[in-house]
Image (tube, coloured by chain):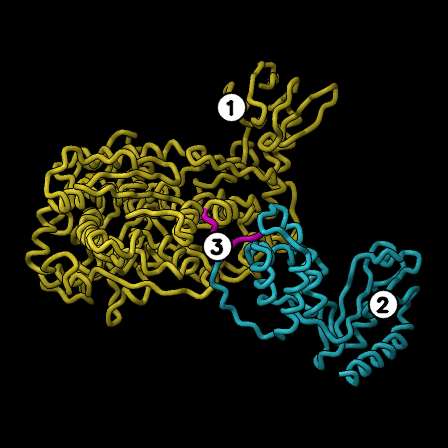
Amino acid sequence: MSEVTEYKKILPEELYRKLDSFVEDLGIDSKDPRKKGYLIQVLHKAQSLFGYLPEEVQKFVARKLGVCHSEVSGVISFYNFFTTLPKGKVNISICMGTACFVRGSEKVLKEFENFLHIKSGGVTSDGKFSLDVLRCVGACGLAPVVMVGDRVYGNVNPKMVGDIMTDCIKLANSMEENK
Amino acid sequence: MAKVIINDIPVEALNDASILDAAKEVDIFIPTLCHLDLESFNIEHRTGSCRVCMVEVELGGRSKMMPACCTPVQDGMKIKTNTPEIIQIRRTVLELLLSDHPFDCLICAKSLDCELQALARQFGIDHLTYTGERSSYPRDTSSNAINRDLDKCIMCRRCETACNEIQTVKVLTGYKRGFMAVVAPPEMKPLNDTNCVFCGQCVNVCPTGALTEINYINPVWKAINDPTKKVIVQTAPAVRVGIGEEFNIPENESATGKLVAGLRRLGFDAVFDTDFSADLTIMEEGHELINRINKNENLPILTSCCPGWVNFMEYQFPDLLHIPSTCKSPQQMFGAIAKSYYAEKIGVSPKDLIVVSIMPCLAKKYEAAKPEFINNGVPDVDYVLSTRELAKMFKEAGINIAKLKDEDYDNPLGESTGAGVIFGASGGVLEAALRTVSEVISKTELKDVNFVEVRGLEGIKEATVKIGELDVKVAVTSGLGNARKILEKIRSGEAKYHAIEIMACPGGCINGGGQPYIHGDTTKLERRMKMIYTEDERKVIRKSHDNPYIQKLYKEFLGEPGSKKSHELLHTHYHKKREK
């Protein structure tokens, strides 16, 4: 670990403070050889705070846990859940797990892509919506499943995409107003 | 001890030994690819990722295929290493590796030095069984030292062990997963945008052509054949003990004279020796050490000959930049003297004098291009070739140096002492400095110039040397992981030394990132080290300050060690580098 950490921070200092106190509250003993084991937990928290894990956040986490930046980057690149690019205000995830896939989730994804004019993994130009795929949310009885934020839509078919998008637009607008 | 039976031969092995090690005891050789055992440094890389070393293990009535490199022996194991089934499995593993590997062996820099190619030949693979998608990435030629071609990577991750565990530079990681996985810096950044120090240890351990040096052979050929240029060459100490391996020169025979003869045949106008400027380094660095000891301030002094180590320090220990010697490395001192003193002597303008270095090192390529070593657009050193590149150049030119009669270096920049040549092995710079500093401080001649306690391949060596009334405490480290340990102790105030030698590569320059590949055979390093000290013993003069051409250089040109002119030409300053 380097002692020089003069990297540029552009994300809000307040969020860094929250992440910092989260790590402090874990009470990790600096001599504990297993402290690396907290990395994934901390990255989850960081992504929930910042929405994504850009280099500056990765370096902050690396320094905080006493691991090197390359290792943090390796872990992030390994897990599909972690993202290094910002997502939209409202993120729409389509399950591509086996059960959802055989029941037609690919067609659902196509429909969303057509509606939003973006590909899976992309963000709309106004930054409101992003689209990605995930692997099984454990609700296979409801396949195909779509998640919008924390909300789960079950038994989705391409015709329902318009209705779901209406909800999404409402959600995005209410987020704007609350701001 | 565990009792096992390998191919019907009973073997007793230590409990933590791997099947691979146990088999070696009875001369049964199991092929490996990702595995790397650097025995002299107690470093073993065994990820078990390639599966080439699969063997059949029977224990408790059940039989299983296991990788030999990372399966420990257990009492009662019955192991088979060469049944038709095992050989077929190994062949399949190799065919699968080859299915995602480019077939440009004919034009690959690593051809005939590639461990994958050697295995494919060993297993008689003569056609492609599997064809499918191949991964493809742009080559990383961002630095002027290391070429990364990930298409040729087989994910053995030896480079990661070298970079992260041995050197603790930590710029490499397993990035992404499955078919998309690569070993690369975070976010697949080009190497030049990372904290890489260009030590080249990753290149040394890479089994394939994924990591090689950036090649400067062509510009050197052009320069040699440019009638408007005078082209001179310097050879680093460790080159002479490595180059012979490329031409099958017998192990105990010195290749130095043949190296000189070969360079002359290539067409260099003068063949000089970095050992000369190593002697010069001792004069300047020794002077600095004596000053600091006399004033008892700013101790310990750290050697500054190794550009890999200087880079490491600039990135990782910017708070300690005041303690290294301000001396340039011998390569850069040579360049500076060549383009001033020598150019003047022969009446050639510095811009028409081309200095080529032959180095056991890749970081030297980076060093030569640093802006602080370029004056008005004229670099002190124009081109740096590794020992391996020079061997290629000889071969291109049809020169087999093994057949050549020994020749001597040219004067004035080719005359050197035993103290200069030992710079090539870990401990040498410090020993050379002690030879000079002891005599200068005590004003009596040394009875024995050999300081054997600082020699050897161990990562950290310590000694206390009596000079006059003073007990001088010294340390020698090689390998940046070891350097980090010492530097952290200095930072915390725990370690008190007068002088410390630091070399980036484990064992020093004999194991530099530009030396002929050893493929894990560290006995070759031990031989190189032995040869370095033999060269030293053969020299009539073994102390830098006794070098008549160095004395002449000071008399005619520099004045005295530490003079204003010396500072202008031979010293440098360090920069705090931002973490990338």
- For disc 1, the marked residue is B24
Q: Which chain is cyan?
A: A
Locate the N terminus of chain B by quadrant.
top right
List x then y, in percent, for residue A138. Answer: 86, 55
Name the mark nearer the viewer: 3 or 1: 1
- For disc 3, the marked residue is B148
Q: Dot 1: what SS?
A: helix
Q: Residues within 10 Å of mark 1 (few under 14, many from 20)?
A: few
Q: Dot 2: what SS?
A: helix
Disc sitting over residue A108 in the figure: 2
Disc sitting over residue B342 in the figure: none
* Residue type, mark 1 in image: Lys
From this view, report whether residue A70 is shown above or below residue B577: above
Query: Is any atom of residue B416 visible in this view?
Result: no
Measured Cα–Cα span from mark 1 to mark 2: 59 Å
Furthest residue in direction bottom, as rendered: A177
Assess whether residue B170 is covered by the magenta stretch.
yes
* Residue type, mark 3 in image: Arg
Left or right, residue B13 beside residue B273: right
Question: Residue B238's quadrant in the figure?
Answer: top left
From this view, report whether residue B457 is shown above or below residue B574: above
Q: Dot 3: what SS?
A: strand
Task: Please name the color used to draw chain B.
Answer: yellow
